[in-house]
Image (cartoon, rainbow, N blue to C red):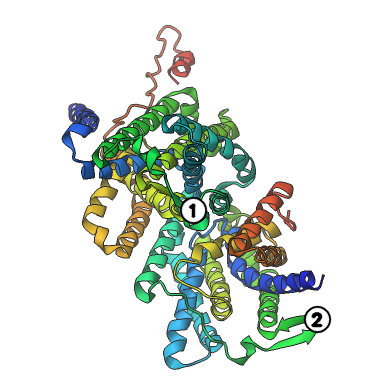
């Protein structure tokens, strides 16, 4: 019983990390109606960027991640403005194929630059510090990441529902053609949305680089986990994505009790069963 | 282009196609064993390109999970021959059947997702199949296992004899896939598929049953993918989750082939496969750079000419080389009452 409860709590905390992966994907599906097949690879790319800057300087990855966040916004903005925007309005196939090509380029570019080795960054003392609550150890770092996820969702909800930029983004998301008529073109709004998505990627990449191992080839598995969290939670609901991430984390944690491949298999099976039972996700809006 | 010139181009391209087909048939006599092995790989990739093109180019099922069914076919063949002790030639069609049976529940689940979601959904399904394959008893777990020698020997006692058998099987499979897809596209269903390719909403409102057509295409490709899996097992002489369900070999290369050659045309996969093999011949030593280059080329192709190299040819005025387009007869105007007889137009379609 204690073991089960412990697995549950740790699973929920890992769920915070998965929710962080998934937030950007949730936004791109909600606002721009596409799946970025390179989503996981961009997160891995950002992790390597943190590593490349932190290692030689000897700085904390968290500080480097913070410094790189504005740069991430710029990269996201430019990527959408000058590449992805060219596929807007041409259906779903071109955007999927372009992001698919990007995914292969990033994976192999990282492999060529950094080699196939598994990496992990050191976050300092917080990594191993834990509080004991009854019979459960709660690591400060997993708890901090979970709180970052909650804070980021609250922040995004604030931006989307309480600011002028958010109102514009929602207008284009609701009806691109109607928004276009009042001067809110997707060419103006999508790059901003992509910049915000890139910021969430940078934050999740920083958190991941200290928490788990990463190597150039793990992008796709991160994409699948993020995608499952989004679909489980329901399209258009960021809090739903958090719940989806928690479900993924808990499923993985219970699966990992059997062996490493059950860890992933349990995650996928929970997703597929939920898809059969609730095709629109748990908290779908509209 | 002037009509005579168009006719000349079409004639020469078709003549080239026939010549290549004849050369392929004469393959065992004109190519040595190592060339036959390369061509076997060519035919398997061409087959995969044709099935992916049917799904993504026509039926709007952008799958990133083709490798799932290839792996199921591979494991089914291994199970039937190595564990079930069936004769290999009897096991081949059965493996295709098993793949189709696996495709039905898979489809029922992933078809709950549409468009972009479906792409990732098929990927998840393929991952699940790979992970389950690694857990099946008797298949060597995560590292896989070799095909027993007696089974391999039934395809030929010597290496060159086997290369010849596999060449013949892969050529037959590519021909079967091509013939089946061509007949499908020329049928009533194919007309609906062509309409879906050009404009899905319009096709739906014109009476094309989109769901039924998608279901048909998905189930149509499954046994073909299973047969590719059988061939992959024979070529590699072993099954393993990472190789039999390889996303790089069975889906990533295939997407590049179709995108570069021309998505949504029968000619595209051929052109793409030829370009892919030529590039590989020169760049195989560069490994990762080769994949980076393919990724970059495919992005440029999508942005510049979404219909690929064949789309470029179409732009220059080259018509179908493989005839699938139906050209409506000109609507005759009845001079006596001045009314257009729409019946004629309808018959033409």
Residue on which the image places disc 2: A135
| Figure check: B239 above or below B150 | below
**Residue at (18, 40) in percent of width and height:** B32
**Residue at (53, 83) in percent of width and height:** A65
Residue A205 occupies which quadrant of the picture? Answer: bottom right
Q: Chain of mark 2?
A: A
Image quarter hosting the N terminus of chain A: bottom right
Is B214 situated left or right of B147 in this image? right
Residue on which the image places disc 1: B241
The kind of secondary structure element at disc 1 is helix
x and y percent of residue A120 in the render? 51, 80
Whether residue B324 appears in this view of the structure is yes
> Residue B283, labelled with which disc?
none
Asked if marks 1 and 2 fall on the same chain, the answer is no
x and y percent of residue A34 in the render? 54, 56
Q: Chain of mark 1?
A: B
| Figure check: B64 above or below B108 | below
The number of callouts visible is 2
* Foreground residue among A253 and B296: A253
Residue B312 occupies which quadrant of the picture? Answer: top left
Residue B171 occupies which quadrant of the picture? Answer: top left
Compute the Cα span from label 1 to label 2: 40 Å
x and y percent of residue B243 in the render? 43, 53
């Amino acid at each position: 019983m204690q073991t089960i409860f412990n697995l549950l709590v740790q699973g929920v905390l890992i769920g915070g990390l998965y929710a962080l992966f998934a937030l950007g994907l949730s936004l791109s599906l909600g606002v721009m109606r596409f799946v970025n097949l390179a989503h996981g690879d961009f997160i891995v790319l950002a992790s390597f960027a943190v590593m490349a800057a932190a290692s030689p300087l000897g700085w904390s990855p968290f500080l480097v991640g913070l410094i790189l966040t504005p740069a991430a916004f710029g990269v996201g903005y430019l990527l959408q403005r000058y590449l992805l925007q060219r596929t807007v309005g041409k259906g779903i196939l071109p955007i999927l194929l372009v992001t698919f090509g990007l995914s292969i380029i990033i994976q192999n570019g990282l492999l060529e630059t950094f080699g196939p080795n598994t990496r992990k960054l050191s976050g300092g003392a917080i990594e191993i510090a834990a509080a004991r609550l009854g019979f459960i150890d709660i690591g400060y770092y997993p708890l901090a990441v979970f709180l970052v996820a909650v804070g980021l969702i609250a922040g995004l909800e604030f931006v989307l529902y309480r600011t002028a930029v958010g109102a514009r983004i929602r207008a284009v998301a609701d009806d691109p053609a109607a928004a276009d008529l009042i001067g809110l073109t997707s060419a103006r709004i999508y790059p901003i949305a992509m910049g915000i998505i890139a910021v969430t990627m940078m934050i999740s990449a920083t958190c991941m680089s200290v928490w788990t191992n990463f190597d150039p080839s793990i992008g796709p598995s991160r994409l699948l986990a993020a995608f499952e969290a989004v679909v489980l939670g329901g399209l258009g609901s960021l809090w739903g994505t958090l719940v989806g991430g928690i479900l993924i984390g808990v499923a993985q944690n219970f699966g990992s009790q059997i062996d490493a491949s059950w860890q992933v298999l349990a995650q996928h099976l929970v997703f597929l069963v939920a898809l059969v039972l609730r095709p629109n996700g748990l908290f779908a809006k509209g | 282009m002037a009509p005579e010139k168009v006719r000349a181009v079409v004639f020469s391209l078709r003549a080239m196609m026939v010549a290549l087909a004849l050369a392929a048939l004469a393959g065992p006599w004109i190519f040595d064993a190592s060339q036959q092995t390369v061509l076997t790989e060519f035919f398997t990739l061409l087959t995969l390109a044709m099935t992916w093109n049917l799904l993504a180019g026509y039926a709007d099922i952008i799958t990133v999970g083709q490798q799932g069914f290839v792996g199921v076919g591979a494991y089914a063949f291994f199970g039937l021959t190595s564990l079930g002790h069936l004769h290999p030639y009897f096991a081949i069609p059965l493996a295709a059947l098993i793949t189709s049976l696996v495709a039905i529940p898979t489809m029922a689940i992933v078809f709950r997702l549409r468009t972009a979601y479906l792409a990732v959904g098929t990927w998840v399904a393929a991952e699940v199949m790979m992970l389950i394959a690694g857990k099946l008893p008797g298949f060597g777990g995560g590292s896989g296992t070799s095909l027993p020698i007696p089974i391999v020997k039934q395809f030929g006692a010597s290496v060159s004899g086997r290369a010849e058998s596999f060449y013949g099987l892969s050529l037959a499979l590519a021909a079967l896939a091509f013939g089946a897809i061509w007949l499908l596209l020329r049928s009533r269903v194919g007309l609906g598929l062509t309409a879906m390719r050009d404009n899905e909403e319009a096709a739906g409102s014109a009476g094309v049953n989109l769901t039924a057509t998608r279901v048909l295409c998905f189930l149509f490709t499954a046994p073909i993918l299973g047969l590719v899996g059988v061939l992959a097992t024979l070529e590699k002489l072993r099954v393993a989750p990472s190789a039999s369900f390889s996303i790089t070999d069975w889906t990533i290369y295939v997407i590049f082939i179709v995108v570069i050659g021309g998505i949504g045309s029968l000619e595209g996969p051929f052109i793409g496969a030829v370009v892919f093999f030529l590039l590989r011949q020169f760049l195989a030593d560069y490994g990762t750079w080769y994949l980076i280059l393919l990724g970059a080329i495919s992005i440029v192709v999508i942005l510049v000419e979404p219909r690929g190299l064949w789309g470029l040819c179409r732009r220059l005025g080259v018509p179908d080389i493989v005839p699938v387009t139906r050209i409506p007869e000109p609507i005759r105007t009845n001079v006596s009452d001045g009314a257009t007889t729409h019946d004629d137009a309808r018959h033409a379609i």
